[in-house]
Amino acid sequence: MKILLAFFILISSLQTWTKANDISDFEIEGISVGESLLNFFDKSFIDELKYFNYDSNEMYSLYVKDNLKTYEEIEINFKNNDDNYVVQAIAGIEVIEIKECLKKKKIITNELKPLFNLDPEEWVHTYDNDYLTSGTNVTISSESTAYISEWKFSNGDMVRIWCSNWGDDVIRELNWNNELHVKIQNKNWMDFLLKQ
């Protein structure tokens, strides 16, 4: 049974859902990890908009903003040289102020707990300003944080929800927004991130 990860899911509707067997049971904007992007987008569209978002060229990223029902934007990650364009990770993204984001994150987290029959790890990550400004001539002095809830599964897959709270100079100098992210990611993607 596919489970739609939306930030406005009603808690009462959860009682009819079965427990999630793995992350492929979830979808964001109708797309699940393990599916081919070619089921949703033309190859030419993907090839035109894909790019390497990290130092390595092992994985591509694709950002889509058009024709979405739940989120303002989705980020899709997939392997380079994969003719099937299989989704390794997908995130729903909403630009939102931090107080409202934390409220929505709490709602989503509480809705997912019974599906996984497991409490998430909760933590706050403080960003390294040198990392944020790498490759730019910008200097940042404010503190930026992410408030994170995540479920790690024994097979290496993960579901993560987080609110980014960028410092004032990050918002001003880098033109970044505070955002809510809901991300489903498989072991391949998690292993890739660990190497970055």
Image: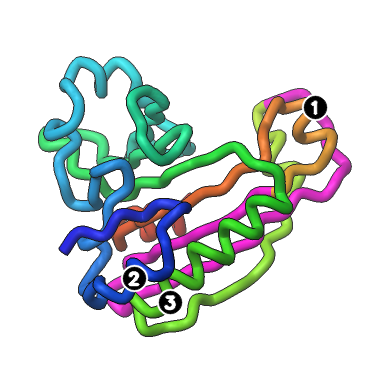
Q: Nearer the viewer, mark 1 or mark 3?
A: 3
Determine crowd level at label 1: few under 14, some 14-19, many 20+ residues with C-alpha closer than 10 A.
few
Q: Amino acid at mark 3?
A: Lys
- Looking at the image, tell me whether mark 1 or mark 2 is earlier in sequence order: 2
Quarter-of-image position of residue 121:
bottom right
Is 135 situated above or below 178?
above
Residue positioned 27% across, 52% down in the render: 27
Q: Kindly identify which numbered label has been placed on residue 113.
A: 3
Q: Helix or strand or loop: what does disc 2 sit on? A: helix
Cβ atoms at labels 1 and 3 below 8 Å apart: no
* Residue 127 in sight in this render: no
Determine crowd level at label 3: few under 14, some 14-19, many 20+ residues with C-alpha closer than 10 A.
some
Residue 177 shown left or right of residue 31 in the figure: right
Q: Which residues are magenta?
A: 136-164
* Residue 138: in magenta span: yes
Q: Nearer the viewer, mark 2 or mark 3?
A: 2
Quarter-of-image position of residue 124:
bottom right
Q: Which residue is mark 2?
A: 14
* Residue 19: in magenta span: no
Image quadrant containing the N terminus: bottom left
For the residues labelled 1 and 2, the Cα–Cα distance comes to: 40 Å
- Looking at the image, tell me whether mark 1 or mark 3 is earlier in sequence order: 3
Residue 1 shown left or right of residue 102 in the figure: left
Q: Amino acid at mark 1?
A: Arg
Residue 31 shown left or right of residue 59 in the figure: left
Q: Helix or strand or loop: what does disc 1 sit on? A: helix
Residue 179 location (% of width, % of height): 61, 43
Residue positioned 64% across, 70% down in the render: 123
Residue 99 location (% of width, % of height): 73, 53
